[in-house]
Amino acid sequence: MPYTSYALQDTNDEQKEHNLWNHSERIALAFGLINSPEGSPLRIFKNLRVCGDCHSFFKLVSKTVGRKIIVRDSYWFHHFYGESVSAQLRMSGNIRADLGLRCVLLLYFGRPKRWKLSEKLEVGRLLYIAITELRNSLSLSSEPLALSAAHGYVLFFDEELIAALLVCSFLCIFPVHDRYEKQLQLVNFDELFASVYDDYSQKQENKIWCIIHYFQRITSDMPKGVVSFERKVLVWEDDSDHVSYPDTNFWSTSVIPLCRFEVQSSGLIEDHSSEAVEVDFANEYLGCGALRRGCVQEEIRFMINPELIAGMLFLSSMAHNEAIDIVGVERFSSYKGYASSFRFSGDYVDEKGLDALGRRKTRIVAIDALCGPGMRQYREKYLLREINKAFCGFLHQSTCQQYQKIPHENFDAASATSTSMDTSDVPNSYDEIRNSQNDYVMMEKNNDIGVVTGNWGCGAFGGDPEVKTIIQWLAASQAKRPFIAYYTFGLDALQNLDKTLVGVVCWILSQRWTVGDLWNMLVEYSKNRSKGETNVGFLQWLLPSIYDNGYMME
């Protein structure tokens, strides 16, 4: 019995049956059966989706003639063999697409709270409602998202909602119109899938394995936490209520002492043992290469913490005076390797506790460095840009009295319990959000939260590793972070940094230098470097005796 509901023309049933018979994939099947050896598999390509009636027809034919039939449409590989039917994504390997139904159900689990479990909604209608609401709520206009977008904003999401958003990305149903004009990225997964099909590489397949593993985890055990996305801004104009963009005089006259500096020659930022601000070596577009072919520090972080991808939906490109702070994302995957050697290596159970707002105690700050700066990175204008970018990311305004704008003397630390929050508990007014931030500020101070970073702005970005090291140390110190832990990742230019920097740091601290003192030395070195008066690195220029005494010897 034909499924005439798949014939969309407004005709009588007899004509609808006739129209179904003429679908191109059926004609291709008939041609293949006539002109191919008996028992050989048939492969059919179609640029549109296969309809449900043709799907049933192919299953019946496969069973009748005893031949394997593979149909590739615009989304799937459909495999028919006897009574067995399966669908695979258009990609290499054995990643199955039977998650589709679970993804639709996930949209239901991530539904608005006003939907009742007892409501009987047909799945297709449910999906339509979910997509419609998401499209309407994510129209992504240029209007401010909070009290004033020019001064930053913070948005809270529960992990269920993020899961529903990522399902929409997985199913490639987000609108793409005008996103580039709004300085937003495309967030559908189609390009990630296509990259494996068009030009296969193991790293791309393993990135997709991380995504698939995330969906497998959440469909069996939906996380209940909260994630916050904050756009941090150093305002351009003088403003008594906000921290303004510092000028060179601010840095040259700073009397803030330098914080503790730890060098880690092995290990990874995400595996740091103590709670800290973890730096994302970001592109100006958050997660820029994550859903494309990128597979370095930022892209890997987005694969093992897929909830970060949700921020790409609404966070436009960062200006020079902006950073993005994300708190609460959960890690789901283990991995090994880097870039072309990246491999998914199994499940990861994130055991970090929750803060008083229900957010996992993982704070990631995205800051973008100058790309391909060459010699211009030594000009004072660009030194200022880089240090202010890092300062914006590392600073929490209320952590130091000189920047404090919001009182928090009424916060009771004893009442801050680590519990999951229902969506109804998430702050929904600007005042509630700011008060919630105050609570987290106090927890930061009590927990001695420093900065964990590494070769930010180096590698593919082409920055000077020693200059970037000093810039991040200065920014963390000015932000009154108690320490900065620096992971060298085995970078050749920094392979002996742990041997050299220990001596340089000890000497600088013994001189009781302030942020202003070290900044002034960095500016002087950069001027000399720009004029060609020196070609050595900053550390050797600053303290040649360290090298003379053999610190650089293997």
Image (cartoon, rainbow, N blue to C red):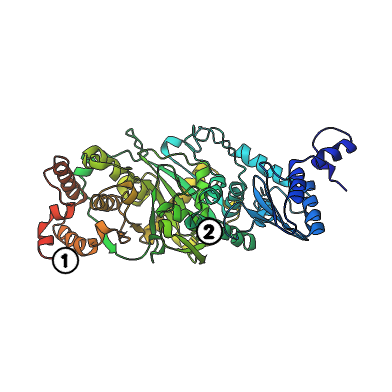
> Residue placed at 36% from the left, 36% from the top?
235
Say which mark, if any, is on residue 439. none
* Relative height, residue 29 to residue 452 (above, below): above
What amino acid is found at the position of numbered circle 1 in the picture?
A: Met
* Relative height, residue 129 to residue 474 (above, below): above
47 horizontally vs 305: left or right: right
- The residue carrying mark 1 is 553
x%, y% of residue 57?
80, 50
> Residue placed at 32% from the left, 56% from the top?
454
Q: Nearer the viewer, residue 258 or 3?
A: 3
87 horizontally vs 245: left or right: right
- The residue carrying mark 2 is 210
Residue 381 in sight in this render: yes
x%, y% of residue 350?
50, 65
x%, y% of residue 376?
24, 39
Residue 305 in sight in this render: no
Instruction: Mark 1 or mark 2: name the one nearer the start of the chain.
Output: 2
Q: Residues within 10 Å of mark 2 (few under 14, many from 20)?
A: many
Helix, strand or loop for disc 2: helix
> Residue placed at 86% from the left, 40% from the top?
17
